[in-house]
Image: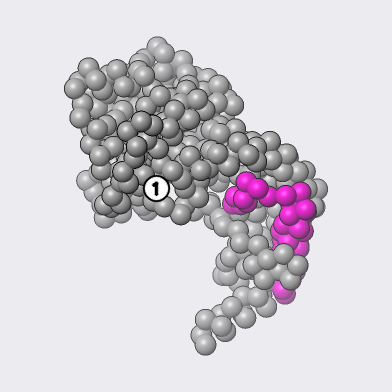
């Protein structure tokens, strides 16, 4: 995608790119960056920079359940075969490890001891994979592997960054020191095609030692003024409204209200809440709706959209469609939390007859 032309800037003040990089350095500890036009392209940049910095090491280790994007190299971080059908050959040196397996740490240890691993890629909370948090002991081991085996740790914060779980990036709260990081979506509130790949002094040193020209090419191709200004505007708004405090407070309120209002509902298996990144796992295996061959998840979502008191637009996780995924605005108020919770509860308490009626009405409207 061709980037818009950059506006002229005064020579006596830092450009928006420099100013945004300075702000992001203070928030993440990562001094260097490469601009991108989407989350997928930011992941692509991170993997290219990591592989280039670590050459001749060539292997990427990605955690199953993660989602890297749909561009060709970004698909390396996506273990689901359905996203790759008909696109072979893709980047070959990729190994996948299930982070929730009982022997996940042993698998990773064996890999880094026997394979030339350049980069380990992960999401701290797998948004597409069910709103699931990577186990703390696995994160602890990754830090050890980073130090002892010299691998680069790439943390994808497209889903969790920009205050979505409270802090600017979740890795800072968990004391994770990534070498590479991606942020997106909230960088421009998805109004402009802009995302960023951040990287450490260590990666920058390795790139410079190889006389790499990739960083400068990425800046020249994707670093446009409106994109950088959108990042700065978000950070300035954060200073005024204190997103972190609001996300933590309303996130806890969502957790409490949902657990209380959804308790006892047969189809609700678990509520997973991380700030304002929320997953509601449903167990629909024994419902009459599923036995009739209808998609119960979509019917529940349709009921939420049609709620008479507070219509609500919610999604679901692509890897696990039985997990509802909700990312409310960072400015959500306490009053809105109560209304939203009521909508979710009303929909999930609906009878089989209500669901069937909703489904039939939807089909009739489509046929018209």
Q: Residue at x 68, y 50 (%)?
A: 332
Residue nearer the viewer, 34 or 257: 34
Determine the image quadrant of residue 85.
Answer: bottom left
- Residue 105 shown left or right of residue 10 in the figure: right
Q: Which residues are magenta?
A: 325-354
Q: Which residue is mark 1?
A: 226
Residue farthest along the top direction in this orientation: 148
Residue nearer the viewer, 216 or 214: 216
Q: Main secondary structure of the magenta part?
A: helix
- Residue 333 shown left or right of residue 153 in the figure: right
Determine the image quadrant of residue 21.
Answer: top left
The x, y position of residue 366, in whole percent, is 52, 81
- Residue 309 shown left or right of residue 300 in the figure: right
Determine the image quadrant of residue 93.
Answer: top left
Residue nearer the viewer, 280 or 266: 280
Above/below status of 208 relative to 43: above
């Amino acid at each position: 995608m061709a980037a818009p032309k950059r506006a002229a800037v005064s020579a006596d003040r830092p450009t928006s790119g420099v100013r945004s990089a300075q702000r992001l350095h203070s928030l993440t500890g990562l001094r260097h960056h490469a601009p991108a036009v989407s989350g997928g392209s930011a992941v692509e940049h991170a993997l290219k920079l990591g592989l280039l910095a670590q050459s001749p090491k060539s292997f990427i280790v990605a955690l199953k359940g993660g989602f890297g994007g749909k561009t060709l190299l970004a698909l390396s971080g996506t273990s689901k075969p359905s996203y790759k059908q008909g696109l072979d050959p893709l980047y070959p040196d990729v190994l996948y490890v299930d982070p929730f397996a009982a022997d996940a740490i042993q698998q990773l240890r064996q890999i880094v001891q026997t394979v030339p691993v350049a980069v380990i890629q992960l999401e701290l909370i797998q948004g597409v994979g069910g709103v699931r948090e990577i186990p703390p002991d696995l994160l602890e081991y990754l830090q050890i592997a980073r130090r002892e085996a010299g691998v680069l740790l790439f943390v994808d914060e497209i889903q969790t960054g920009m205050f979505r779980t409270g802090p600017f990036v979740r890795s800072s709260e968990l004391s994770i020191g990534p070498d590479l990081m991606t942020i997106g979506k909230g960088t421009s509130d998805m109004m402009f095609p802009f995302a960023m790949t951040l990287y450490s002094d260590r990666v920058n040193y390795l790139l410079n030692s190889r006389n790499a020209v990739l960083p400068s090419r990425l800046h020249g191709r994707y670093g446009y003024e409106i994109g950088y200004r959108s990042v700065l505007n978000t950070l300035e708004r954060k200073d005024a409204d204190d997103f972190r405090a609001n996300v933590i407070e309303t996130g806890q309120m969502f957790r409490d209200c949902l657990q209380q209002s959804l308790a006892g509902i047969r189809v609700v298996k678990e509520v997973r809440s991380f700030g304002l990144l929320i997953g509601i796992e449903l167990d629909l295996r024994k419902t009459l709706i599923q036995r009739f061959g209808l998609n119960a998840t979509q019917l529940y979502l349709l009921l939420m959209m049609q709620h008479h008191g507070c219509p609500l637009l919610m999604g679901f996780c692509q890897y696990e469609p039985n997990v509802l995924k909700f990312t409310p605005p960072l400015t959500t108020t306490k009053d809105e939390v109560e209304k939203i919770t009521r909508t979710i509860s009303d929909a999930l308490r609906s009878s089989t007859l209500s669901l069937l009626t909703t489904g039939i009405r939807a089909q009739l409207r489509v046929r018209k």
